[in-house]
Image (spheres, rainbow, N blue to C red):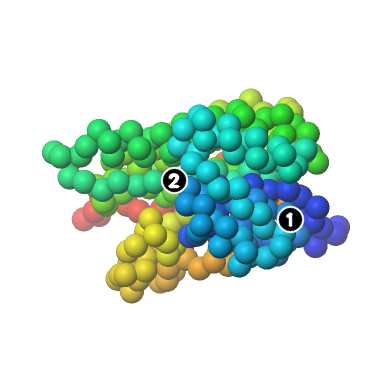
Amino acid sequence: MDIPSLFTLEGKVALVTGGSRGIGRMIAEAYLSAGATVYITARKAEACEAAAKELGPHCIAVPGDISTLAGIRRLVDMLGERESRLDILVNNAGAAWTAPLDSFPESGWDKVMDLNVKSPFFLIQSLLPMLRASRKPAKIINIASIDGQRISPWEVYSYMTSKAALLHLTRRLAAELAREEIIVSALAPGPFPSEMNRAAIDDRDNLAKIVPLGRIGEAEDIAGAAIFLAARAGDYVVGSALTVDGGIVASTFAGSIE
């Protein structure tokens, strides 16, 4: 058994949405280290170009706004001008919104649901020809959240709903695409430092107290999980979500024990 070959991404072409910062950048860097050519996209072109430059010559920026169908089509066209196939798609771009229940706005609901659920679906749909042309099997990895697996303690109503929906969408797409050797799975991260999860930066020590492992997630934690799912090692993981949270979901109780 050739163990190193199970975890290499040599010769693979990957696209990571929201790849200029946070978990997306951690994944992009991991894939580059494993031998892939990585395209990253982000809404802010300057930040996307800067991140690609920092990550090295095998990282290419394709900036754009994938919150709209027109933006998705532009991204797919840009990618298609450079590549004839796509081996790995990581749907990481996302948004969150926090507001009290009584005043939670429609805009906060629509923005989050559109970017976190609608955009991954239509991006996958648009990239199917390139995924079908991949070095089989192709991989689609949806970045969900532990907030889609348990009740969040924060008032992020649209966010946790969107991530639960993304997990269910992952299962449905996996069932649809497995026979074409397009393997769909998900990652459900816990607290990692990012602009979306400012608490993991600003209140790191207190947030770590709710993690059974006693610490916030690090880049290597998400990198190992993301490489596993993208590489040959994860070829038989179909429709499942790999939870990377230091034990939060596994230790969450529905109520107190007398």
Which of the two residues, 86 or 172, is positioned nearer the viewer here?
A: 86
Report the residue at 61% width, 67% height from top: 54
Residue 47's place in the image compared with 171, above or below, is below
Q: Few, some or many C-alpha atoms within 10 Å of disc 1 (few <14, some 14-19, many ≥20)? A: many
Say if residue 241 shows up in the picture. no
Residue 255's place in the image compared with 54, above or below, is above
Which of the two residues, 202 or 252, is positioned nearer the viewer here?
A: 202
Seen in the image, is 255 located left or right of residue 218? left
Q: Nearer the N terminus, badge 1 or badge 2?
A: 1
Amino acid type, mark 1 = Ala
Seen in the image, is 118 located left or right of residue 231? left
Seen in the image, is 133 located left or right of residue 50? right
Can you give x and y, in whole percent of width and height, for residue 243 in the image? 50, 52
Q: Residue furthest bottom?
A: 205
Can you give x and y, in whole percent of width and height, for residue 39 in the image? 65, 51
Q: Secondary structure at mark 1?
A: loop
Report the residue at 85% width, 59% height from top: 2
Q: How many marks?
A: 2
Image quadrant where residue 30 sits: bottom right
Name the residue beneath numbered marker 2. 94
Report the residue at 32% width, 70% height from top: 202
Res 36 label: 1
Report the residue at 41% width, 53% height from top: 249
Say if residue 219 shows up in the picture. yes
Image quadrant where residue 206 sits: bottom left
Seen in the image, is 107 located left or right of residue 139? left
Can you give x and y, in whole percent of width and height, for residue 88 in the image? 68, 45
Amino acid type, mark 2 = Gly
